[in-house]
Image (spheres, rainbow, N blue to C red):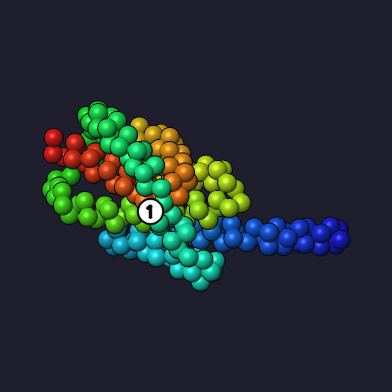
Amino acid sequence: MLRLFKTELRALYDFLRRYIREVIVTFIASLCLALNEYHPIQPDWASSLVYYAAIPILSIILLLRRNPLDFGLRLGNWRLWGIHLAIIVILGLPILYAAARMPSVANYYTQVEFKLVRYSLETAAYLFGWEFILRGFLLFGLKEKLGEASILVQMVPFVLLHFGKPEIEMVSTIIMGIYFGYVAYRSNSCWSAVIMHIYINITARIFVNLL
């Protein structure tokens, strides 16, 4: 029994040492998601920037000893992700307009006083943090060992973060989570996901509150 215990401890140690970078990335990402849930900072966009951007970036520098720009913060292949952005803009308009007409979506996103400029700025800050921890820190932190499978890993927390929102939106995040991750992976940049997510969010709000 003691020998088996020692063998298992050794195997666990070897596993952690072999995947130390991936362990750090998944631990920090999970911790930040939990901290934002249980110890949120007000306003929401500040909480996102602290937990989803600042802490992961500091961990990249201090724990991983890497350049944060290597975690999707470069422009990457902007011509490639620009094509995908154009597709989202064109196809997204009719889809978002139709979704905004659904009672479940309209009731959830209707605001009494909707100020477009303020909302857009706060949403841009909020979603930058959100996208960086998923399509930047997590995706590129796991890319070296997991390869394209890292696209599937980052999709899971993206879907979970949408629990409580309209069902149609939550289900759609399975597809969009994979798509955002795929484009970020292929273009070597998380900016594609940042811009696409901001566009979708703000456009949907405009359709619900202003049209």
Q: Is residue 122 left or right of residue 135?
A: left
Name above or below for residue 29 compared with residue 104.
below
Name above or below for residue 108 compared with residue 102.
below
> What kind of element bears circle 1?
loop
* Coordinates of residue 142 in the picture (x, y in percent): 55, 52
Q: Residue at point 36% right, 44% down?
A: 79
Give, as a three-letter code, the residue at label 1.
Leu
Placement of the N terminus among the 4 image quadrants = bottom right
Residue farthest bottom in this picture: 62
* Coordinates of residue 125 in the picture (x, y in percent): 29, 57
Quarter of the image holding residue 206? top left
Quarter of the image holding residue 64? bottom right
Q: Is residue 41 left or right of residue 57?
A: left
Q: Residue at point 55% right, 50% down?
A: 143
Q: Residue at point 13% right, 35% down?
A: 211
Q: Is any part of residue 166 visible from this angle?
A: no
* Coordinates of residue 171 in the picture (x, y in percent): 41, 34
Q: Nearer the viewer, residue 131 or 88?
A: 88
Q: Is residue 142 left or right of residue 200?
A: right
Q: Residues within 10 Å of mark 1 (few under 14, many from 20)?
A: some
Q: Is residue 52 left or right of residue 156?
A: left
Q: Is any part of residue 66 visible from this angle?
A: yes
Q: Which residue is mark 1?
A: 75
Q: Residue at point 40% right, 57% down?
A: 73
Q: Nearer the viewer, residue 94 or 68?
A: 68
